[in-house]
Amino acid sequence: MWKPMGNSRSKRDSMMIKHLGHAEFTIDMVQTLHQYFDTYEVNGVVTVEITNAGLWLPNPHFSSRQFLGLARWPKAASH
């Protein structure tokens, strides 16, 4: 069961939680996810793929996916 963590985390807690990345959503992306939720859900859960080209909804019934969106252009690599 998920429990919110306070500001003071123990060493053990910080070892258990590992940041893997971020996904940013615009309101249009959230509305699209809501509109097509029943199409892409499996047991009440939707998977969102994060790629360098944006966020995608893999179709669990066919080998296809729908582009959900890209909230921001990726930051340019510094030289």
Image (spheres, rainbow, N blue to C red):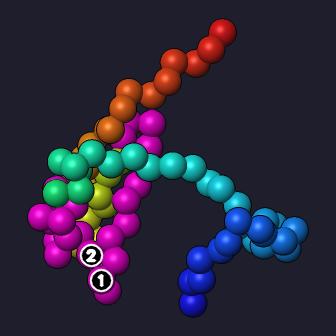
Secondary structure of the residue carrying tag 1 is loop
Q: Is residue 49 magenta?
A: yes
Question: Gap between marks 1 and 2, in whole Å?
Answer: 6 Å
What is the residue that sits farthest to the bottom in this orientation?
1
Secondary structure of the residue carrying tag 2 is loop
**Residue at left 40%, top 55%?**
49
Total label count?
2
Crowdedness of circle 1 by 10 Å Cα count: few (<14), some, many (20+)?
A: few
Residue 62 in sight here = no
The foreground one among 13 and 18 is 13
The three-letter amino acid code for the residue at tag 1 is Gly
- Left or right placement of residue 22 versus residue 36 in this view: right
Q: Is residue 51 magenta?
A: yes
Question: Tags 1 and 2 in contact by the CB under 8 Å rule?
Answer: yes
- Left or right placement of residue 21 versus residue 60 in this view: right
Can you give x and y, in whole percent of width and height, for residue 8 in the image? 77, 68
**Residue at left 57%, top 50%?**
21
The three-letter amino acid code for the residue at tag 2 is Glu
**Residue at left 65%, top 56%?**
19
Reading the image, the residue beneath label 1 is 44
